[in-house]
Amino acid sequence: MNFSRILIPIAVIAFVAGAWHQYKWPGVAVSTGAVVMWILLHFTRMVTVLSRASNRPVGHVSSAVMLNAKLKKGVNLMHVIAMTKSLGVRLSEENAQPEIFKWTDSGDSFVICTFKAGKLQSWDMTRPQVAETEESTASP
């Protein structure tokens, strides 16, 4: 169960009720304004992240290795989109849990991320196989 869906509205109600108890209507006006500003900040961040992602190819990341190093369990999908500056390629069915997305870099390395309820559960990075002939010719 996601407790933030319950705790955040309860905290907002308690905040406004505390402002009412302490300052009456001016307190309600200020606390409601603060809550609206908090909501607008989150909305603005979401729109900014999505507008940056809309200018990049879907599923492309500059470095899959760096993305793999920066990922942490429990971050939300919006945070990963902000890190990659790109929407991931959906590998799972629409509206199915868990959601699976893939980001690929220019060297064909890719990271596959699994999200459950919008939170990162696991990820796996895969690098392309280097042919043995390339390895032997690259060695001095």
Image (spheres, rainbow, N blue to C red):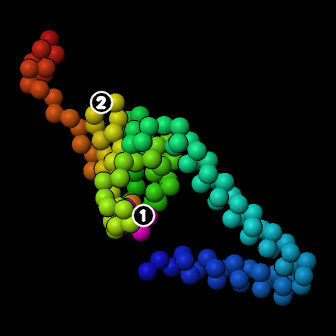
* Dot 2: element: loop
Give, as a three-letter code, the residue at label 2: Gly
Camera-side residue of 70 and 126: 126
- The reply, left or right, for residue 90 in relation to residue 42 is left
Q: Position of residue 83 (x, y in %)?
A: 48, 45
Q: Which span of residues is magenta-colored?
A: 115-119
- The reply, left or right, for residue 111 in relation to residue 41 is left
As measured in the structure, the alpha-carbon distance from the residue carrying label 1 to the one carrying label 2 is: 27 Å
Sequence-first disc among 1 and 2: 2
Q: Which mark is residue 107?
A: 2
Give, as a three-letter code, the residue at label 1: Lys
Residue at the image point whose x is 85% and y is 72% from the top: 30
Q: Where's the N terminus, which quadrant?
A: bottom left
Residue contact at pointers 1 and 2, CB within 8 angstroms:
no
Q: Position of residue 45 (x, y in %)?
A: 62, 53
- The reply, left or right, for residue 21 in relation to residue 2 is right
Looking at the image, residue 4 lies above or below residue 132: below
Looking at the image, residue 16 lies above or below residue 127: below
Which residue is outermost to the top?
A: 140
Q: Position of residue 5 (x, y in %)?
A: 55, 77
- Is the residue marked by circle 2 packed among few (<14), some (14-19), or many (20+) residues within 10 Å? few
Q: Which mark is residue 88?
A: none
Camera-side residue of 73 and 79: 79
Looking at the image, residue 17 lies above or below residue 131: below
- Residue 115, quarter of picture: bottom left
Which residue is outermost to the front?
A: 94
Residue at the image point whose x is 11% and y is 26% from the top: 131
Is 73 covered by the magenta stretch? no
Residue at the image point whose x is 14% and y is 11% from the top: 140
Which residue is label 1 attached to? 119
Residue at the image point whose x is 30% and y is 50% from the top: 112
